Image (cartoon, helix red, strand yellow):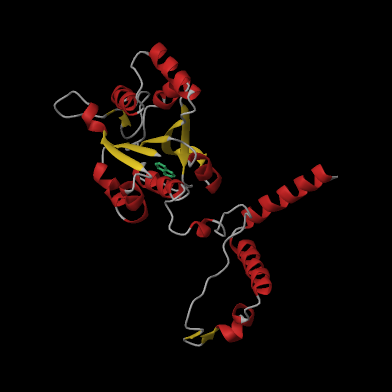
């Protein structure tokens, strides 16, 4: 999988050279390329933004600079007709290219989104700053037939797309075969297929500062694995009910929906 990140803060992405993604990048499982958007400016001040049309606070990132950058990174000719043909030809060869634009105005990024993006051959991240990127940019690439996903990582305000790109990259890259040392750990995670939060985990010592698992959760130490699995699921359900009523409501709706189909 190839990951490209276009940003005015390339150093922000250096953290990806560490740990999991760093190792994967080193072994060629994941090719990560970070691009400085200002490399596609032509003026002395390397300007990437301008005042908002229609007025309003802040600055908006220019479509012309982004267009040149994304044509290069997506490997598309500048001419729209030729670009459309290139996209169609690429799709024909089964090569899946996705343009991700992190934005607070995007669809919510979830584990399902991560699982979907993990099947792409190339994911290009356009990281906006200021008030965002001119809205014609994602629109233009959608019109060329490029798969464009405008994604929010949650309902809170960041200053730009780079932190969101890091979150999305970590969630996606770890799903790629060979990236995680222990593939089993992808199975019983929070937000996995079961739609529950993960059960609480513990390790030695059994008794720690008066918290004695032999007293509070003897089943965990019983070696009776069906019992342990059952009690862990009970804990996962209790946690989900207590912390994420929204997930419980979704599970309920799915169950009822399944019931209707079964009826
Ligand atoms: O404001 C943030 N909320 C959620 N996702 C984002 C993605 C990119 C920029 C900013 C945000």
Q: Classify residue 164 by image quadrant.
A: top left
The residue depicted at 44 percent of the width and 55 percent of the height is 180
**Viewport quadrant of the C terminus:** top right
Specify the quarter for ligand 1. Answer: top left
Residue 171 located left or right of residue 194:
left
Of residue 243 and residue 197, the one placed in the foreground of this image is: 197
Residue 253 located left or right of residue 79:
right
Residue 160 located left or right of residue 202:
left
Of residue 255 and residue 56, the one placed in the foreground of this image is: 255
The correct choice, above or below, for 192 with respect to 54 in the image is below
**Viewport quadrant of the N terminus:** top left
Where is residue 30? Give x, y as percent: 37, 43
The residue depicted at 49 percent of the width and 56 percent of the height is 183
Where is residue 156? Give x, y as percent: 45, 48
Q: Residue furthest right?
A: 263
Count every numbered label the image shows and give the total.
Answer: 0
Residue 1 located left or right of residue 47:
right
The correct choice, above or below, for 199 with respect to 27 in the image is below
Where is residue 20? Give x, y as percent: 37, 54
Q: Is residue 144 visible?
A: no
Q: Is residue 193 visible?
A: yes
The correct choice, above or below, for 16 with respect to 91 in the image is below
């Amino acid at each position: 999988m190839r990951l490209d990140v276009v940003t005015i803060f390339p150093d922000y992405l250096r953290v990806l050279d560490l740990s999991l993604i760093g190792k994967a990048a080193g072994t060629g499982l994941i090719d990560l390329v970070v691009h400085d958007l200002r490399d596609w400016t032509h003026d002395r001040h390397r300007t990437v933004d301008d005042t908002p049309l229609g007025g309003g606070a802040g600055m908006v990132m220019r479509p012309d600079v982004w267009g040149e950058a994304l044509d290069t990174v997506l490997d598309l000719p500048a001419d729209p007709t030729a670009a459309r043909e290139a996209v169609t030809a690429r799709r024909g060869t089964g090569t899946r290219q996705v343009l991700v634009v992190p934005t607070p105005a995007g669809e919510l990024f979830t584990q399902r989104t991560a699982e979907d993006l993990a099947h792409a051959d190339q994911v290009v991240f356009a990281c906006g700053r200021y008030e965002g990127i001119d809205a014609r940019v994602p629109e233009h690439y959608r019109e060329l037939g490029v798969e464009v996903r405008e994604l929010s990582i949650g309902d809170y305000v960041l200053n730009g797309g780079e932190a969101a790109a890091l979150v999305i990259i970590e969630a996606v890259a770890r799903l790629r075969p060979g990236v995680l040392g222990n593939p089993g750990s992808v199975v019983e995670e929070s937000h996995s297929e079961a739609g529950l939060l993960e059960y609480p985990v513990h390790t030695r010592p059994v008794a720690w500062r008066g918290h004695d698992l032999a007293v509070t959760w003897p089943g965990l130490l019983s070696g009776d694995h069906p019992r342990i699995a059952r009690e862990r699921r009970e804990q996962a359900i209790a946690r989900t009910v207590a912390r994420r009523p929204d997930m419980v409501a979704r599970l309920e709706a799915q169950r009822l929906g399944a019931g209707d189909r079964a009826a």
